[in-house]
Image (cartoon, rainbow, N blue to C red):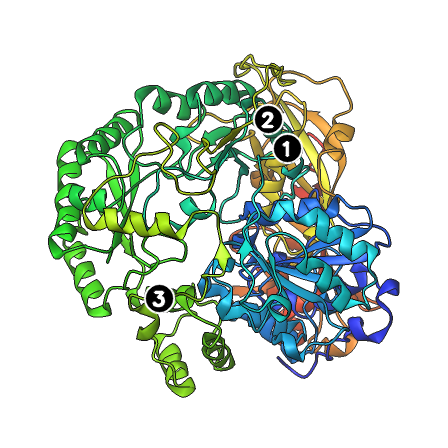
Amino acid sequence: MTGHWKEATNCFNSEPFEKKTIRRCFKMLDEILPLIKKPVRYTGGEYNVTIKNKPEVYVGIVFPEIYEIGMSNLGIKIIYHLFNQNPLIQCERVFAPWPDFGDRLLARKIPLFGLETKKPIKEFDLLGFSLQSELNYTNVLYVLDLAEIPYRSKERTGQHPIIIAGGPCTLNPAPLSPVFDAFIIGDGEEIVPEISKILVNIPNYKKEERLKEMAKLPGVWVPEIHHYEKIIKKITAPSLNDDAIPAPIILPICDITHDRFAIEVMRGCMWGCRFCQAGYANRPLRIRPELSILKAVERGIRDTGWEEVALLSFSILDYPNLLNLIRKLNEILKKKRVNVSLPAMRGEMFTKELAILLKEIKKSGLTFAPETASEGLRCRINKQFSNEQLISSIRLAYEEGWHQIKLYFMIGLPFEKEDDVEEICKLVKEIKHSCPKGNIKLAVSPFVPKPHTPFESAEFAPLEELNHRIEILKKIRKGRVVLNYQDPEVSFIEACLSRGDENLFMVIEEVYREGGKFEQWREGFDFSRWQKAFEKIGIEPREYLKRREKHPWDFIDIGVSKKFLSEEFRRATQGIVTENCYYGECTNCGICEGEKGVKFRETSEKYLSSARTDERKQAVNPVMYRVKYSIGEIYRYASHLDITRTIYRALRRTDLPIQFTLGFSPLPRVSFGPPKSVGQISKGDYFDFYLISEYFGNISMELNTKFPPGIRILDVRAMPSNTPSLSSSINLIYYEVTIPESMIRRPLDFSHQKPVYIWAGSETRNICDSVESISYKDGTLTCGLYYGAKNINIYQLCSYLTEIPVEETRLFKVTRTLLFIKRNGLLYSPMEVK
């Protein structure tokens, strides 16, 4: 960066937080956000976000990954919702910044903050980390480092927040026990109300007293109090409580990994796949009633406008009368053109009727998880279906219009031989032969032995063996088959971390000190860095991967008995299948003490949807409306795609008779004007949308109630059907740019008598052909630029005037003030018809 820019003022340290505003913090961040990738990750201000006035307690829910992955996680949305149910608690979200932003925070000594209020998280009362993957462990240290919080609990004082963790990785809390003050083992929603009471009733300066009270709660392990001496029993929610359904749910501004409304329809799985930690740790099976799902989905789409509803479960095809549920959901959702999607399925229960229902509105992706193609090995891992059943399901999917199927496989499973891997190649060839038109996407992962499973003591396969088996699978990577696989070295580290003890923390710490973060990402993972750390600390990693009888997690009781897990491993050695107790007899795993472990809240109440169930036909003569709207500070860093997505979803939230597009992915019929660049605000942008019939109410008011605060509807007018499109007619844009006078280095003279050429992208262009007018007064550059493919943009103009690189001109505050149609020397507003 050039020396023209002053160092950012650290507004967090300049005065008490209560006197600071989100606007001021945005002003401070404006010197960073224009220079990084996806700045909207860090701005907050999303639709349905919770911000309270003078709360007494601050809680941060920390997901140690990027925003797009964290906001896809249903668990943190549930915990966020439950903490915010207490009027005295402000719960905020915290994600791991990508290094382009994190490095700048460190350089400028800006402590990491919560998205909602921009308050530094080091000033919070409690930080709760969601540990979903062992490969995120270095990111835990990264987040605490950015927050200016010591990451060893013994180095923290009463001035620091209480740091706790939850999520599946806490089933072996040992490797991160030096970091966290407490671990929540089990269903977090059960414990949040109790933790909330402790935080509200005990003042924040009594941190030790708060921890002592937490240590008394079921499912809570406090290392400094309990050590490894007390058996910690997992806390289990007796049923899927409607109070834990997030409502209203936050709608992200940018696209996220799983961009949809998700609802958990079942928790737990009784199939007993012997490698699957989630299946055992989430027992018993609990089923959400159909009525509860229908109510939650209708409200969720009404609150968000999402295009898809995902029904989440480890074994979705086991949901009682699933077809009837999807049929009712389609009736509710078809008016808004919202489709239903399902998670990965086992492979043997996919039917024609289910396929027809899933594609009724829009076909989403289909994934099957056979895990192995060897039927003998499938018995050992307790997968109970045949290759013929799988092929039949895939053939049916292709016949019903799906063009691609995704298949999950594992390699390196206990008892696996090379012939078992060859069976995968054989199965894929059979699928190709049986289904000559469909594409196949294979996702292959090395088996990682996980705690609290029958295979918890199994060895991790040698790297050489895993690499050889991947080479075998590469033979089928041709034509219609795509093969993706996880690097065995990544799985090697994951296995060490999942089975490690507290000594392993020194390795994690060393890796982080050497730059290790975002280890789940290809660009973040460095196997040699881990090898050097193990060597420096003096730990042989392979010792963690050998078969052992005692484990660091043996003091954790998930409810499934060790005796049952041992018996399951014995049955695996003999290839004996254990039946699903949901359909058959109790297997005496210990979770329900001999009673059928299914929790299903029955209800006789019938659901009457508020949505109209008749599907409106496309209008013969739809009515076009043109909308003028402004884009404020909150959406300044949103991309054009983010803005269009926001508009689509806002229209879905209305009760207007929206016309939708036809085809594979129906959307509200909308067309847009010239896209705004990331970092700009606008006093007047435009979009057109169509209604299937004329609307006589106040459209502007209806829209403003559904749009987020960062976007305001200024005017709405019905337009003739032959009105030229915005993109083809708007050809002049006016800007205001805040630039210090001392930075203007060149004259503002662009008369056509003297061409001024600059390099613009891939060619030279004459600035004079683009500048309609230009002036400078009191620190503000005002100009009109012609809009078109051969014209320069505002940043290229500012770069020429200031002689600084184009990318750095994005630090100037740019406002789009007016958009015009210029024709025959006259200016027309897009709202006029000429």
Q: Position of residue 553 (x, y in %)?
A: 46, 62
Which kind of residue does numbered mark 1 sit on? Asp
For the point 35% across and 58% down, which residue is it? 456
Q: Position of residue 257 (x, y in %)?
A: 49, 49
Q: Are marks 2 and 1 in contact (CB under 8 Å)?
A: yes
Residue 431 in the image: above or below residue 226: above
Question: Badge 1 local density, few (<14 within 10 Å), some, or many (20+)?
Answer: few
Residue 69 in the image: above or below residue 549: above
For the point 46% across and 77% down, which residue is it? 503
The residue labelled by disc 2 is 292
Q: Are marks 1 and 3 in contact (CB under 8 Å)?
A: no
Q: Position of residue 223 (x, y in %)?
A: 60, 68
Dot 1 or dot 3: first in sequence order is 1
The residue labelled by disc 3 is 490
Q: Position of residue 519 (x, y in %)?
A: 44, 67
Which kind of residue does numbered mark 2 sit on? Ser
Quarter of the image with the C terminus in it: top right
Q: What distance separates the C-alpha of mark 3 from that of mark 2?
A: 40 Å
Residue 664 in the image: above or below residue 370: above
The residue labelled by disc 1 is 242
Q: What distance separates the C-alpha of mark 1 from that of mark 3?
A: 38 Å
In this rendering, position of residue 50 left or right of residue 78: right
In which image quadrant can residue 105 be found? bottom right
For the point 57% across and 24% down, which residue is it? 294
| Front in this rendered view, residue 555 or 416 | 555
Q: What distance separates the C-alpha of mark 2 from that of mark 1?
A: 7 Å
Residue 656 in the image: above or below residue 670: above
Which kind of residue does numbered mark 3 sit on? Val
